[in-house]
Image (cartoon, rainbow, N blue to C red):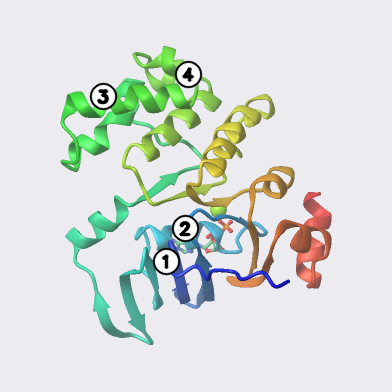
C-alpha cells in the first residue's frame, strides 16, 4: 500500500533567499537561504560571531541586506541584488511587516517605566490594532498563559530575569504575530531560571506557533526543533531534523561546534 502525502501548498511562513550582509570588508552573512514552513520550529545553532543575531535582525528589518530577499507569508519584504534596488518597501510597509513578526531579545528589553500589563498592552494600542481596554484584556490573558497572571501591576525591576523574559514573550504574542524570533532567550538568565522560560517556549511550539530560535541549549533544541540549522561564517553549513544534525553531523565544523557545547 502506498501512502499519499498531500504537499504543503501554503506559502512559507518565512523565506530567506541568498541574503548577504556586510560591514565594510567584513562579510557577516554570506549567502543564506532558509525556508520555514507555517507551524515549524527552527533552531539556529552556531558559534559566537557566526551571524545568527544579524540574520534575525535582517528578518525583522532592523538591518538591510546588501543582497537577497526575505519574504514573510509569501509577501516580499525587500529585494536587493548586487546593489540594484529592484524593490524596496517604504517605512510604513516595513512597520506593517514588523508587526507580523515577534522578537524576543536576550536582555528582555521591557519598558522600565511601564507595568507588566502595559508592557504587553502597549504595542497593539500604539499600532491601532486594539483599543486600550481590549489590549489590556488580551494582556491579562497572555500573562496568564505565561504564568504571570498575578504580576500584572508589577514593574519590570521587581521581577526576576525569568519572569521578565516571560513578560517579553507575552508582549511578542500580543501582536498576534505569524512568526516569533528568539535571540538567545535564556543566555542572560541565572541557570535556575532557564527552565521556566524554555517551558513557555515549548508550550508555544506545541500550540503550532511558527518559531525561529537562536539558542545554545542543545537539549532544548533536540526536544523542540523540527529542524536545526547550523550556521558558521555567515553560511548555513548544514540543516536537518535534530537526530540528523545533532547525532550524525555531516560537517567537521558542526562536529567541532557540538563537541564544545555538548
Ligand atoms: P552571533 O549572533 O552569531 O554571535 P552576530 O550576528 O552578532 O553573531 O555578529 C556577526 C559578526 O558581525 C560579528 O563578527 C560582529 O562583530 C559583526 N557585526 C555585527 N553587527 C555589526 C555592526 N553593526 N557593525 C559591524 N560589525 C558588526
Ligand atoms: Mg548573537
Q: Dots 1 and 4: beta carbons under 8 Å? A: no
N-terminal of the pair, mark 1 or mark 3, is 1
Is residue 87 at all visible to an observer of this figure? yes
Seen in the image, is 147 located left or right of residue 67? Answer: right
- Which element carries disc 3, helix, strand or loop? helix
Residue labelled with disc 1: 10
**For residue 124, which quarter of the picture?**
top left
Mark toward the viewer: 4 or 2: 2
Residue labelled with disc 4: 159
Residue labelled with disc 3: 136
In the displayed structure, 71 sits above or below 66; it is above
> Which x, y percent locates residue 159?
48, 18
**Residue neighbourhood size for the residue with mark 3, other residues' Cα within 10 Å, grouped as few (<14), some (14–19), many (≥20):** many
Mark toward the viewer: 3 or 2: 2
N-terminal of the pair, mark 3 or mark 2, is 2
Mark toward the viewer: 1 or 4: 1
Seen in the image, is 44 located left or right of residue 257? Answer: left
Q: CA distance from mark 1 to mark 4?
A: 40 Å
Residue at the outermost front position: 1
Q: CA distance from mark 1 to mark 3?
A: 33 Å
Q: Dots 3 and 4: beta carbons under 8 Å? A: no
In the displayed structure, 135 sits above or below 258; it is above
> Which x, y percent locates residue 32?
53, 74
N-terminal of the pair, mark 4 or mark 2, is 2
Q: CA distance from mark 3 to mark 2?
A: 28 Å
Q: CA distance from mark 2 to mark 1?
A: 8 Å
- Which element carries disc 2, helix, strand or loop? loop
**For residue 119, which quarter of the picture?**
top left
Q: Dots 1 and 3: beta carbons under 8 Å? A: no
Q: Dots 2 and 1: beta carbons under 8 Å? A: yes
N-terminal of the pair, mark 1 or mark 4, is 1
Amino acid at each position: 500500500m502506498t501512502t499519499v502525502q498531500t504537499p504543503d501548498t501554503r506559502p512559507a511562513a518565512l523565506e530567506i533567499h541568498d541574503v548577504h550582509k556586510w560591514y565594510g570588508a567584513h562579510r557577516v552573512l554570506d549567502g543564506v537561504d532558509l525556508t520555514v514552513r507555517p507551524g515549524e520550529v527552527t533552531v539556529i545553532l552556531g558559534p559566537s560571531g557566526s551571524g545568527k543575531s544579524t540574520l534575525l535582525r535582517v528578518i525583522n528589518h532592523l538591518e538591510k541586506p546588501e543582497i537577497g530577499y526575505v519574504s514573510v507569508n509569501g509577501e516580499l519584504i525587500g529585494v536587493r541584488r548586487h546593489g540594484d534596488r529592484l524593490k524596496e518597501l517604504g517605512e510604513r510597509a516595513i512597520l506593517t511587516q514588523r508587526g507580523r513578526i515577534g522578537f524576543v531579545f536576550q536582555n528582555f528589553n521591557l519598558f522600565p517605566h511601564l507595568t507588566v500589563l502595559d508592557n504587553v498592552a502597549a504595542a497593539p494600542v500604539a499600532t491601532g490594532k486594539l483599543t486600550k481596554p481590549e489590549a489590556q484584556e488580551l494582556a491579562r490573558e497572555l500573562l496568564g498563559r505565561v504564568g504571570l497572571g498575578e504580576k500584572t501591576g508589577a514593574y519590570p525591576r521587581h521581577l526576576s530575569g525569568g519572569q521578565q523574559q516571560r513578560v517579553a514573550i507575552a508582549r511578542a504574542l500580543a501582536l498576534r504575530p505569524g512568526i516569533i524570533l528568539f535571540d538567545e532567550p535564556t543566555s542572560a538568565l541565572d541557570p535556575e531560571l532557564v527552565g521556566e522560560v524554555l517551558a513557555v517556549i515549548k508550550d508555544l511550539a506545541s500550540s503550532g506557533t511558527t518559531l525561529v530560535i537562536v539558542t545554545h541549549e542543545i537539549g532544548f533544541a533536540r526536544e523542540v526543533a523540527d529542524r536545526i540549522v547550523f550556521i558558521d561564517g555567515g553560511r548555513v553549513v548544514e540543516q536537518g531534523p535534530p537526530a540528523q544534525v545533532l547525532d550524525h553531523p555531516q560537517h567537521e565544523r558542526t562536529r567541532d561546534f557540538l563537541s564544545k557545547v555538548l
